[in-house]
Image: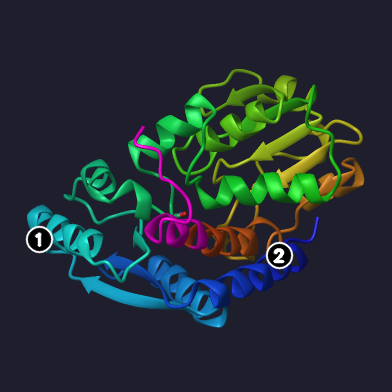
Amino acid sequence: MDGRALAARIRSEVAEAARELGSLRLATILVGDDPASQLYISRKHDAAREVGIEPLDHRLPASVSQAELLELVSRLNADESIDGVLPQLPLPEGLDEPGVIATVDPAKDVDGFHPLNAGRLYLGRPTLVPATPRGCLALLVEAGVQLAGARAVVVGRSVIVGKPVAHLLLQADATVTVCHSRTVELARHTLDADVLVVAAGIPALVGPDMVKQGAAVVDVGQNHTAAGLVGDVDPGAADVAAHLTPVPGGVGPMTIAMLLDNTIRAAKYRRGLLAFPPA
Ligand code: GUN
């Protein structure tokens, strides 16, 4: 499953939609100087520019107060020229992350993390859906993997990936099991999976001996190790699986492509081309 190729196709569709919509602006907020977050933000900005979305770069020191941060979010919410508002996570220690996420206008919440959007996903009436989970599903669909009736196992229960991807799989009529750090005998679950999504943040957590013959495996891991960037799945799993997303070049490029696609959706809300449901 080639994330680079599919992401390139989505980006070109986004570029066409952006041309039709006219001026689009995505505001990001980076608090503090975490090097990984700086890299992610610069990648998001480059990708936005490339498809004709203007990135607005807001940076605040790690010492910023919660009130000042919320003030900036509110200002960006109220700015009629801005389509999307994205506070880069994680926020530095001492700031109330859920409070910041809940302050973003749900119709500009291109990350899909606002409780209203998370709740709508849970209810099966999605609006703005988190980018990485959308990328996982798009890769599976592109590979022609049958999801209806499939046994899907998600390893990881984060708010950014594990929980939303489980809901998307459920909505696609898979039978979904969510495993996590307290799961006993993880391999018993993963060996049963026709579709396995691993988002645990542990290098090579899932080895070839934990994968069912012919399974479709999506590796969401982005672990920076001495050996470079590695996933949560041992690449040897490719010998057992029918499909495996590589790291790098799998889910990573899809996340940014889906963020841009979410920005198009938010732009349609702002222009009244799509109605944003109140709840
Ligand atoms: N940090 C890690 N993943 C993400 C993401 O998808 N969005 C934001 N805003 N921050 C992140």
Point out the stretch of residues depicted in magenta. 264-279
Q: Quadrant of the C terminus?
A: top left
> Mark 2 is on which residue type?
Gly
Res. 68 mark: 1
Q: Residue at x 45, y 73 (%)?
A: 39
Q: Residue at x 87, y 41 (%)?
A: 241
Q: Is residue 270 left or right of residue 141?
A: left
Snapshot quadrant of residue 177: top right
* Position of residue 50 measured from the top left corner of the image (x, y, whole percent): 56, 81
Residue nearest the observer in this picture, 103 or 156? 103
**Tag 1 or tag 2, which sits nearer the N-term?**
1
Snapshot quadrant of residue 224: bottom right
Residue denoted by label 2: 249
Colouring used for the render: rainbow
Question: Quick check: is the Cβ at mark 1 less than 8 Å away from ligand 1?
Answer: no
Q: Residue at x 26, y 46 (%)?
A: 97
Q: Is residue 65 left or right of residue 263?
A: left
Residue nearest the observer in this picture, 258 or 152? 258
- Which quarter of the rendered image does ligand 1 occupy? bottom left
Q: Secondary structure at mark 2?
A: loop
Is residue 7 positioned above or below 145 on the image? below
Q: Is residue 272 magenta?
A: yes
